[in-house]
Amino acid sequence: MRHIFVKTAVAGLLALGMASCADDLNISSIDPQTSPSFEDMSLLAKVYGTLGVTGQKGATGAGDISSDEGESGFYRTTFNLQTLPTDECNWAWQTDQDIPQITGISWNSTSVRTQWAYQRLGYDITLCNFYLQETAGKAEDANYKYYRAEVRFLRALHYWYFLDLWHKAPFKDEKSSMTEKPVEKAGKDLYDWIDNELTEIESQLSAIGSFNDSKNYGRVDQGAAYMLHARLALNAPVYTNGVTKAYDKAIEYCDKIINSGAYKLSNVPKTNPTNGLTYSGYAQLFMADNDENTDAMKEIILPIRQDGEKTRSFSGATYLISSTRITGMPYAGTTNCWSCNYARPNLIEKFFPNDDIPMSTVKAPDNLTEAEIIALDAQDGSDTKSIIAAAGDDRALFYAGRGGGIRKLRTDKLNNFLDGISVVKFQNIRTDGKTVHDKEFPDMDIPLIRYAEAFMTRAEAKWRKGDMTAINDVNVLRARANATPLTQLTEQDLIDEWSREFYMEGRRRSDLIRFDMFTGKKYNWAWKGGVPNGQAVDSHFKYYPIPLDDINNNENMHQNADY
């Protein structure tokens, strides 16, 4: 159903007459009494589409919410809060609003980036509630049972982000009046609601693995619900302040996924006939044809659909690819290189613990062709292929060659893209060598939930229960990456493996918190706390502050401690 869920996503709300503006979950433009008409399949398209687009008119114009449209999308806002404060990457444009505070973990209740994420999640939940209200009369229809369960999943996913980022949510469901203010649901209460909601809808969703085909790819099925449920359970001690431990439940849901046979890890190398490069199974997960590559599709449980022609946005795949490129890099895959996100040294050390990543030390002469730069990089042994070989790990998708300038591993400043190694994990290049739809807006679907998470989740849950067979699941992923198997599994091994497998996929903060490494002094990294070598930060930074405007406008919400 790509024609429903992607192609019509931009146009989906034109019939609803919705405009921008968000205030918690009270968005006046969604009032059915003020909308000229209602078309439920268009709204369903919008509910899915809002994961990957920010409005109704392409990359700019008619944004869903009244902030910077490029900055206000679902993926970009959540990615920034989950990734930019961690050991994975820095944002070079330190003059951008709120970026120094996010980088150094020193934000407060006036943080605009916190507000953008809060508003986006609230807006999307309102869409879900509106859809469920308006289709209540079709609840027994065979198709609508699936549609409604899918929308309930997406709502639960958004509430999970609220729980993870803020430890609470401004809560409304389809039974709430459009005019009443959200109530606060926090900690264990919100955890229990998500837990119960997922339990209730799982039997109503399409069977696990139903949508791993080109026609329906991108829709929610039981596999997505099981994986979110496992993720929720693994984090139960954090979300419930230690009241609930649900490691057995996490294992149970991972078993359902792994034992189903519905998914498999992408592990078959493919050679691009145009550029001659061979891409590992892992690399293929993040390429422009990952929605046509059957091996990649079998691993991606739930993608955010992206299309350079029909889902143009500066918030999704464009953000991941353009922000990590600088003009002059070979195989950039985009004509719009922002020169923003680069790797913190601590990420590189996950693959090169001795800081011995191959790097060029001489800048390429001006006016060289891409082919000439590629040849020099190969000569230096600083191209991605050489870095992968030196790391002994297919997941080491970095570039430290001459293209765009000479990079550093570590630095005492933050505002230069060349102050760190380039991440080239995400690519607007097809494995088959065919032309992409657009040179600026990528075709790469974002893997929001993928099969590999089931192995890491099960491994950690077993490890926390004292079951050392956990190492087997970690080694399944290392085998796919052609990395040497681990012979022991320590806490450090686990948190490092989470990073090696999922770096720059918008989850690092959550993982560090679960290991008690995000705040405090247990683990410091470059620029944690705003200093070059890192320093401890206070524990209240585990959760973001409720935006001040939302506190002032809704007496039901209470500010998180110490903000």
Image: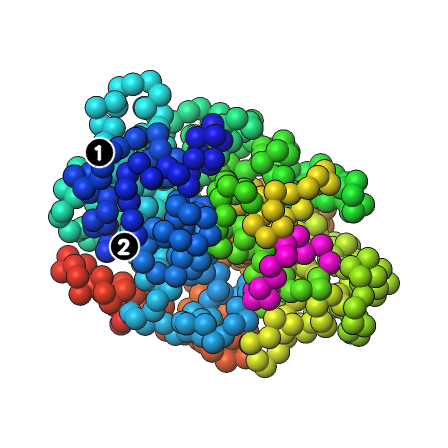
Residue 3 to residue 169: above or below: above
Q: Which residues are magenta?
A: 330-343
Q: Which residue is drawn at the image coordinates 56% and 66% (left, top)?
A: 340
Tell me if I can see residue 255 in this picture: no
| 415 drawn magenta | no
Q: Quadrant of residue 228?
A: top left
- What's the mark number on residue 133? 1
Residue at 36% x, 43% y is 157
Out of 171 and 315, give the one closest to the viewer.
Answer: 315
Say which amino acid is labelled 2.
Cys
Where is residue 285? Give x, y as percent. Answer: 61, 43
Decide which of tag 1 and tag 2 comes sooner along the chain.
2
Task: Give the residue at mark 2.
Answer: 21
Residue placed at 27% from the left, 72% from the top? Answer: 562
In the picture shown, does residue 384 fall above or below 537? above
Q: Taking 420 as reference, is 315 left or right? A: left
Left or right: 374 in relation to 462: right
The residue type indicated by label 1 comes to Gln
In the image, residue 16 lies at what x, y percent?
A: 28, 38
In percent of width and height, residue 36 lies at 22, 37
